[in-house]
Structures are given as structure tokens and as C-alpha cells.
Amino acid sequence: MPTNDLWEIIGLALACSLPVVLAGAILIRLARSWSLAISMVALVLIPTVATFTGVLGASGVIKLTGEHSGITLGVSDSRITASFDAHGDIQWSFSEPRSDFASLQPGQISVQNFVITLSTAVSTTEIPLKVSIYDVDQPVVSVADAAPVASPVTLTAGTEDVAYTISAATLLAEMAAKKIAVEINLTSNAITPGIVGAQHPLALYRAAGVPVTLSADDEGVFRIDLTNEYVRAVTEQKLRYADLKQIARNGLEYSFLPGASLWRDGDYRAAAAPCAGAPLGADTPGPACAAFLKANDKASFQWRLEMHLAAYEDAVLAGPFGRR
């Protein structure tokens, strides 16, 4: 690029940025002259505060520092009031008839935005105020049981759809009984919410008998593959080969592959009737087993997994873990 063009670009950039810099300096000077430290407010309004009055209401304080004499307060809406208290802070309140939100459904949020204005003879400062109204018609919550002791739950006829709480112990027991598998993404969980090591619920699921599988979640984003997750399960979660073997089997058992499973009722010690007694993973299963595998994709993939497990154990582990 020619030198003259470069200097022209630099001059243009400075010319465009100079007004912004000057405006910023003026604002800083005004803020210092007022000595105001303004806290932005975000309010989540719980509708049950107005159960008996029919009016949703809330209030709060915006902390200010410095002298506020000569400053006039204003509000953008009649639903908001604001005034200075004895400490020079702003006391504000919000109120609105509950009926205004009659159409709001459970889980929906209505966000109301307001502005509190601080004015002098020469300038104005605006403080945004956000009020969020949610679950105005939230259903009554019936406590079915309480942690840590789980107990059988019987819901009264006609209240089956009413929200209710359930303890972790009850939930885990139900998941284990119904064989509801949980997909575990160790790397994703470590990077996104920061849950690692003993903080991760993997051990909790396994101790409760809940089937788990491992997943890479998003290989393109996290730059990993499924092998990485198995390595992490060993190094971080201290799983053994037998644990990994069960998890690998779970990956197929609880997949959406069509057809019947190779295993009887999810028991990895008992093959389905057509393949019962046959050496798992054999190159040439018996006629009945071969026909069963041909007719069921899931069983076929499971048989191939057993072939690979057997080959690995024979070649690398010399069979200390057996074929099961």
C-alpha cells in the first residue's frame, strides 16, 4: 500500500474517532460532578406476593454515592414510583393489577422495561429498570415425598397432571427399574458447566443401577472423539476395564437400532434364546442364532461388538476378564 494512502486512512480514522472521545470525556466529567454510582437493576417478580391483594407489587433500592441536591427524579411509567431516601439512595416500587397478566401461561415470562431519570438543569441520566413477571397462574405443588427417604407415591384421582416434587432417590430408583439410560458427555460437561471429577453425577447414576453410556457430544466443537471420552472415564472417573465394557454394551443395548436385542432383558450374562449357549462373538454362530442376527440389526451389531471384545481380551489381556 502506498505511504500516502496509509496516512490518509490513519487521518480518516482519527477524524472519525475524535468526536466519540470528546463525547466520552464530557460524560465522564458530568458523572464526576454528580458523584453518582448507579446500580442497574434486574428484578424477577414472584407473583405469589400479590395473592391476596390482586395486585403484583415489588420494590427495591438503587444505591447512589455523592450529593444529589438539585437532581430531579422522573419515571417513564405510572406503574413505577421513585424517590430519594434519607441516605440519598433511590427507593423505587412497582405495582400493576394481577388481571393484566391473566393470559400469561405457566412458564411464560412478561418483561416490563422502565426508566428512572435523574435530571439537572443541564443534563439527564437514565437508569434502566427491568421487571419480569412469570408463572402468574402457577399450579399448586403437591409434595409427593421428600429427600432423603423415598416412599411410594399415590396421586389422588384427577390430580395426575398436577405438578409435584420427587426426591432424587425415588427418581434414580425409577430410572434403574425402567432401565432409562443416561448419556454422559464428560468433556462437554467439564468445558461447559465445569463439572469434573467427583462433582460429576456419573458415579451416582452407576451406584443407583441406572444404565449409562458415553458420548462425545459435539466432536467438531470440542475437538475430541469417543475414544477420548473412554480415556477420560478412566483417568478422571477411575473406571476399570469391566466398567468400560459394560458402558460399551449399554451404547448398543439402549440405542435406537431396530430389531430385538442380543441380550435377554438387558442381562449381559444371558443371551436371547436363539443364541443361548453359543460362543458369543463366534465367526460362525449356529443356524438359529445366525437367522436371529440377520433379522435383527441391533442383535447383529451387538454380536460384532462381542467379537471385538473377545479378540481384544484374547490378544491383549490374555483373558483375565473372561468373555463376559
Image (cartoon, rainbow, N blue to C red):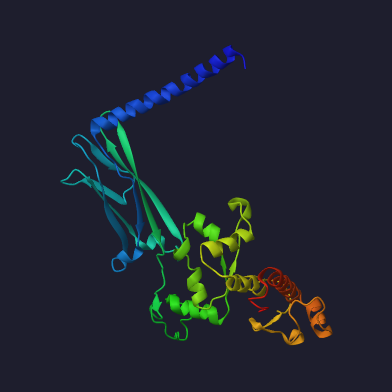
Point 58% across, 72% down: residue: 243
Q: Nearer the viewer, residue 115 or 6?
A: 6
Compared with residue 182, is residue 226 higher up or lower down, i.e. above or below?
above
Point 24% across, 33% down: residue: 34
> Which quadrant holds residue 311?
bottom right
Q: Nearer the viewer, residue 230 or 129?
A: 230
Q: Position of residue 111 (x, y in %)?
A: 41, 53
Compared with residue 205, is residue 98 higher up or lower down, i.e. above or below?
above
Point 28% across, 29% down: residue: 30
Q: Quadrant of the N terminus?
A: top right
264 lies left or right of 88 = right
Q: Nearer the viewer, residue 223 or 62?
A: 223
Q: Position of residue 160 (x, y in %)?
A: 48, 81
Q: Position of residue 168 (x, y in %)?
A: 44, 75
Point 50% across, 21% down: residue: 13
Q: Residue furthest left?
A: 86
How many tags in the picture? 0
> Which quadrant holds residue 75?
top left
15 lies left or right of 79 = right
Q: Residue furthest right?
A: 287
Compared with residue 295, is residue 234 higher up or lower down, i.e. above or below?
above
Compared with residue 88, is residue 14 higher up or lower down, i.e. above or below?
above
291 lies left or right of 224 = right
